[in-house]
Amino acid sequence: MRSDHNFIDGQFVCADSERIAVHNPATGELVGHVSAASAADAARAVEAATVAQRAWRRLPAAERGAALNRFADAIEARAPAIGAVLALESGKSVADATAEARYAAEILRYHAQWARRIEGEVIPSDSANENLILMREPIGVAACLIPFNFPIYTLLRKIAPALIAGNAVVVRPSNNTPCSAFEVARAAVDAALPAGLVNILAMDHDTAAVLCTQRGVGMITLTGSVGAGRKVLDYCKENIAKPSLELGGKTPAIIEADADLEAAATAIVRSKTTHCGQLCTAIERVYVQRDVHDRFVALLREKMAAVRFGDRAVDETRMGPLVNAQARASVHAMVQRALAEGAVLETGGTLPEGPGHFYPPTLLSQCRQDMEIVQEEIFGPVLPVLAYDTLEDALRMANDHQFGLSSVLYTERYRTAMRVANEIEAGELYVNRTPADPYQGFHAGWKRSGLGGDDGKHGMLEFTQTRLVVMPF
């Protein structure tokens, strides 16, 4: 059984404190314990990061890039160990968890390439004898709040751009999946990163508030729920820290009559059942043109019913569990309310017996736009379907929503694709494929789906601030 301790100023701190129990969601078995950081630990971590950042920012960017490449090599070397513990605490297969670690290493390598590309600007002045120079500078210390669903990928997705831009970080992993984060801390030691540059602490919500309101924290970046995002905005008010928030999603998929229905159904079911639907960009509602509605529902029903769930350590082809008992209860309650409101159950919708937080792939037809199951994020393997008559109807319903993270369109007509690209109210549109968050793009939400964003040049620039230098001559 594992016993992990918080990583502060380059050391694993073994303290007499409360411990957080970590369980395997597929079996209910205890994976291990992690130390719960105290308010003093959080303050110490921010101070260590502040000291480390002052030296780190002075390094030539090319040296910071070389350090990120060493870090990537260390993550790659530790990928089997990271994957093994991530599989236990998340319910993923070992293969998928190890692949997540290796993909996270690639994010480090990608951001290392920005070392010589973080550029300022020279702006024309109104005076003949004056130059205006806009410089890009690091913010300082970033607090990074990491979700449970892709904890290693998201952790590196945030700290890689923070580090290359010259910042230091204090990371709070999810209490559902904290153990794998401490394997990343070991990789930071292997890579000889400066002490204090990367700090990783498990903690309760009260201590997280203490962390985020430390005077030295200049930015808070979160991937999480809308409710968590509101709390972060409250934390930011204390020191006017910069927020970067990736929040809820309710990805609509619009299926036009000319679409390849077989390919669309296969991809949508895969999106909905990957990691038990616990992806912020998983398909959450499907709008189908009425002429092909019944045929498409039949395809979805067949493919959803064919997906088996169970412990992926036993059979990695199966769909794994939800994160905990509360999540399963919430998903099932949403399904029951949808049925009470008039939705039709095509498959699934029952609570399985036995250990583990499993829930069957569930398809609901004859849903309405005003139903909770269409309006609120499910974050589970449940798919509501609605019919539409015209593309105008589909766009109206897709955009009639509080969220605007990602969206999907299946069509063979380029004019349809261009119209939806111009009119969909979301930060991303995927045409004839499901979302995958390419790390050279920009993953940013509209409406209540967030502020700022991750990935690519623009995600990296989130971790910078500007200085205008006015120079008469």
Image: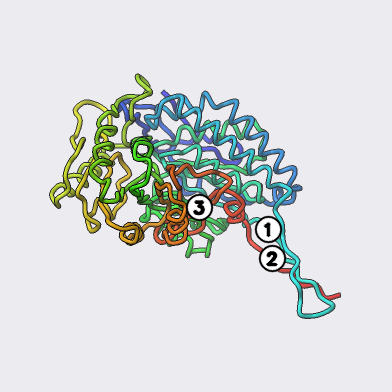
Front one among 298 and 358: 298
The type of residue carrying mark 1 is Glu
> Which element type, helix, strand or loop, lies under badge 2?
strand
Q: Quadrant of residue 415?
A: bottom left
The type of residue carrying mark 2 is Arg
Q: Which mark is residue 467?
A: 2
Q: Is residue 39 left or right of residue 189?
A: left
Q: CA distance from mark 3 to mark 2?
A: 22 Å
Q: Is residue 224 left or right of residue 331?
A: right
Please name the residue shown 48% across and 61% down the image: 236
Q: Which mark is residue 417?
A: none
Residue 401 in picture, x, y percent from top left = 33, 60
Residue matched to label 1: 137
Regarding residue 277, the answer to whether it shows in the image is: no
Residue matched to label 3: 221
Residue 90 in picture, x, y percent from top left = 39, 32
How busy is the neighbourhood of tag 1: few (under 14 within 10 Å), some, or many (20 plus)? some
